[in-house]
Image (spheres, coloured by chain):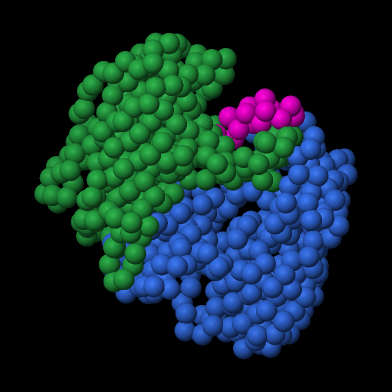
Chain colours: A blue, B green
Amino acid sequence: MVFISLHLQSNAKVVVEVLDAYEGRAIDASAKFCREDVNPATGPIFVCGAMPGDVLAIRICAIHPAGIGYAGIGAGALSGRISERLIQQFEIGDAIHFSRGITLIPQPMIGVIGVAPCAGRLSTMDAGAHGGNMDCNLARAGATVYLPVFVEGGLLAIGDVHALMGDGEVGGQGIEVTAEVELEIGIIKNWSLKRPMIETDDVWATVAAGDDFESAVWMAVHDMVDFLTSQLNITDGEALLLISLTGDVRVCQIVTSTPTARVEFPERLLSNG
Amino acid sequence: MVFISLHLQSNAKVVVEVLDAYEGRAIDASAKFCREDVNPATGPIFVCGAMPGDVLAIRICAIHPAGIGYAGIGAGALSGRISERLIQQFEIGDAIHFSRGITLIPQPMIGVIGVAPCAGRLSTMDAGAHGGNMDCNLARAGATVYLPVFVEGGLLAIGDVHALMGDGEVGGQGIEVTAEVELEIGIIKNWSLKRPMIETDDVWATVAAGDDFESAVWMAVHDMVDFLTSQLNITDGEALLLISLTGDVRVCQIVTSTPTARVEFPERLLSNG
């Protein structure tokens, strides 16, 4: 576990060092992990002036993965079919060699990014209104992650960077890496946000976690209806119709006890609305 | 219901006229529909030489939607929140006017494309191993849909074209249109396919329907593991890991009693494998 406490002014830039999801020990096939060992997050970062009801706007300026990462498939993935305990180490350069001439292109993203809840403790294995283990691969360089603030300062924490991860993370891991993450953190007043949103050059996305995937989807759809009605001055029904026609329901990850879904809406339709 | 019977030689080209999902009557808000009225499919097309165990390769050469389409939101969509019965008519040109300056770009796709089962009847509301109401928006011009053959001739049928539909179809409809669809239909011997696959310029996708979305996902993942092990000569575990890193689990539709999921895998990784 990494525990720092950093006080930042709004709009400050910061570089955060992030450990990989297993603190480097997952490459050892004999290692045993309990739930508390996984997804160490660096933080908390106290953002001066952030108050409950505000929104943190966390712009991801860059993600620099370390030179070595690893990925395996979890016990129980594709249950009943695959029993091998596979762990593979990868050199992370401009390209990543998989095997037999298969070359992957890195696309670093932040798996865990979240704030503190009103009260109590949250596992960095879980996702929710606070963000957390969303494993949403839109959280990459150039994107801005918006998180509701529940306590003074927000208390942001970040971890679980992947050099590459497909939507769904069906084997249970991306390429797990330590990394340096450059962020610019701002505060937005007067925006009531129930759950995380992410903005990229192409889309706005609402992100939700649920007890099952379908409940996550419908939360994310509700949130996107809220967003579109406020942005485009249309009715709830028109917003739902617009999502049905041109929004995309996407899978973030579907392998933890709180699977996450997102609804992506084209940025260009908001700019001409 | 449209019932034709057309005998085609393999690799023949054919133009299929397709009615919209409600035979044009959905624009009448007072119209009542029963399950049998929805998604009329044009067919069956008997493909000479197609035998059980073969695969039909249906290349979608072009989709020409008619000039007018419509879309609404179903009763019960976003249950408890939206009670309005909204139906909107759209002129389909190079662009589609939604409202308040919001302009959508058509991307026609085939909602229902399927073959006959071994025995019995299937509703065109449902999806399954036979294809059917997959509502997968990869089924657009330039793509090839692969379907397993269960009876002699395959007995292909096509319907439910949408001028535009987002992944998920969360309001219950895309822009429903009548259309002309140009197809080229071939037969592939010696390929054992359990469920549909779709090939585009960018991806190969396995498509599965389930009683819930998560069961559909895991079927599609199993199918992609089968495909990758056969194409890349890797183990099941390596295939799952590769999907975890660089495949994408995507939502086709999540609003019928048989939601459909797909796993997309990058075409370029197969060509250099």
Q: Which residues are magenta?
A: B220-235
Residue B98 point in image, percent of width and height = 29, 63
Give the residue at x 85% y 46%.
A89
Name above or below for residue A47 compared with residue B11: below
Residue B207 point in image, percent of width and height = 50, 34
Image quadrant in which the N terminus of chain B is located: top left
Residue nearest the observer in this picture, A78 or B175: B175
B196 with respect to A27 (left or right)? left
In this orientation, does residue B211 appear? no
Number of marks present in the image shown: 0
Q: Magenta residues: mostly which secondary structure?
A: helix
Give the residue at x 24% y 41%.
B178
A71 with respect to B221 (left or right)? right
Q: Quadrant of residue B222?
A: top right
Name above or below for residue B52 compared with residue A226: above
Name above or below for residue A90 compared with residue B45: below
B223 drawn magenta: yes
In this orientation, does residue B94 appear? yes
B221 drawn magenta: yes
Name above or below for residue B209 compared with residue A52: above
Residue A67 point in image, percent of width and height = 86, 57
Residue nearest the observer in this picture, B12 or B167: B12
Residue nearest the observer in this picture, B187 or A127: B187
Which residue is outermost to the left? Answer: B30
A51 with respect to B240 (left or right)? left
Image quadrant in which the C terminus of chain B is located: top right
Q: Quadrant of residue B16?
A: top left
Give the residue at x 46% y 54%.
A248
Give the residue at x 51% y 31%.
B197
